Image (tube, rainbow, N blue to C red):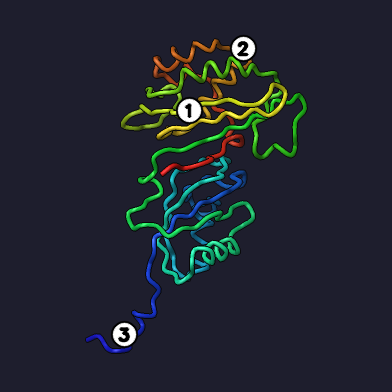
């Protein structure tokens, strides 16, 4: 039989609400987004730990994308149900007070129960930064890939045009990846910057395969060095063979800029 005391205790429990958290992090010292074996530091792990310290309850969070070890985020999105009476601003402040210096909640919003960071996403925007200076830049080392050889931005931009649209990107997915389909749609691929200075590769699409952006950039860098012709991109796409594309660009240059809903 349920007594009056039980009813009172139930009423005192905060209601579980669905939140969308927008996160910024420096991925250098993380083993990626997703939880790994015990002892491995991940973004998901430290955010879940902060939520538990704030609320006293363990809450599983779901990210819009599983960034790899060393990859950064300016606008990663996570959804999570949290039992709390805190307003969104207070929740954001409380979480940031309990997070390490290399990750922060930049926005918190209460959302409809149907919202899911991954399954509700319509697309993502990534930016890959290359430092093309002849002398290495220590201040850029954690967030850019250093490529001291001069790069031809015009030729790389021509090559990138072949990639926009709906294609089978098997040649640009991580070796050994098993997916139902490697067909993806890129809506934009822009390269901006100056030879001998910082160059940014910005790509937007509905979805991406594992290591896809880094493999695309690694291949474009070969075009920039004169090792490949821009028009070869069509042949690489048609081959559907990872060995036909260039190397995987290092993780340090990649940032998840935005998740679109």
Q: Is residue 31 above or below residue 19?
A: above
SS at mark 2 in the image: loop
As displayed, is residue 84 above or below residue 47? below
- On residue 226, the disc is 2
**From this viewpoint, which residue is outermost toward the bottom?**
4
Label 1 – label 2 distance at C-alpha = 23 Å
Badge 1 is on which residue?
A: 188
Q: Residues within 10 Å of mark 1 (few under 14, many from 20)?
A: some
The structure residue drawn at horizontal position 43% and vertical position 45%, both measured from the top left corner, is 64
**Mark 3 vs mark 1: which is more N-terminal?**
3
Q: Earlier in the sequence, mark 2 or mark 3?
A: 3
Q: Pointers 2 and 3 in contact (CB under 8 A)? A: no
The C terminus lies in which quarter of the figure? top left
The x, y position of residue 183, in whole percent, is 36, 27
* Separation of residues labelled 3 and 1 (CA atoms): 57 Å
Image-based side of 154 in relation to 138, left or right: left
| Residue carrying label 3 | 6
């Amino acid at each position: 039989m349920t007594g009056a005391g039980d009813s009172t205790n139930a009423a005192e429990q905060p209601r579980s609400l669905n939140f969308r958290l927008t996160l910024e992090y420096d991925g250098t010292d993380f083993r990626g987004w997703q939880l790994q074996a015990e002892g491995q530091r991940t973004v998901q792990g430290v955010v879940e730990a902060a939520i538990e310290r704030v609320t006293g309850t363990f809450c599983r969070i779901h990210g819009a994308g599983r960034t790899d070890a060393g990859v950064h985020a300016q606008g990663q999105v996570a959804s999570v149900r949290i039992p709390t009476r805190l307003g969104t601003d207070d929740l954001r402040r409380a979480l940031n007070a309990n997070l390490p210096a290399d990750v922060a909640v930049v926005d918190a919003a209460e959302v409809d129960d149907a919202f899911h960071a991954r399954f509700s996403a319509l697309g993502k925007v990534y930016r890959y930064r290359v430092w093309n200076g002849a002398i290495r830049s220590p201040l850029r080392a954690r967030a850019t890939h250093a490529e001291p050889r001069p790069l031809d931005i015009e030729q790389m931009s021509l090559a990138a045009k072949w990639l926009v649209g709906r294609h089978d990107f098997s040649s640009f997915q991580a070796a050994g990846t098993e997916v139902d389909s490697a067909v993806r749609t890129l809506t934009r691929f822009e390269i901006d910057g100056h030879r001998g200075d910082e160059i940014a590769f910005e790509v937007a699409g509905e979805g991406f395969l594992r290591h896809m952006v880094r493999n695309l950039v690694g291949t474009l860098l070969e075009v920039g060095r004169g090792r490949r012709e821009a028009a070869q991109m069509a042949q690489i796409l048609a081959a559907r063979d990872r060995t036909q594309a260039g190397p995987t660009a290092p993780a340090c240059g990649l940032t998840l800029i935005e998740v679109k809903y």
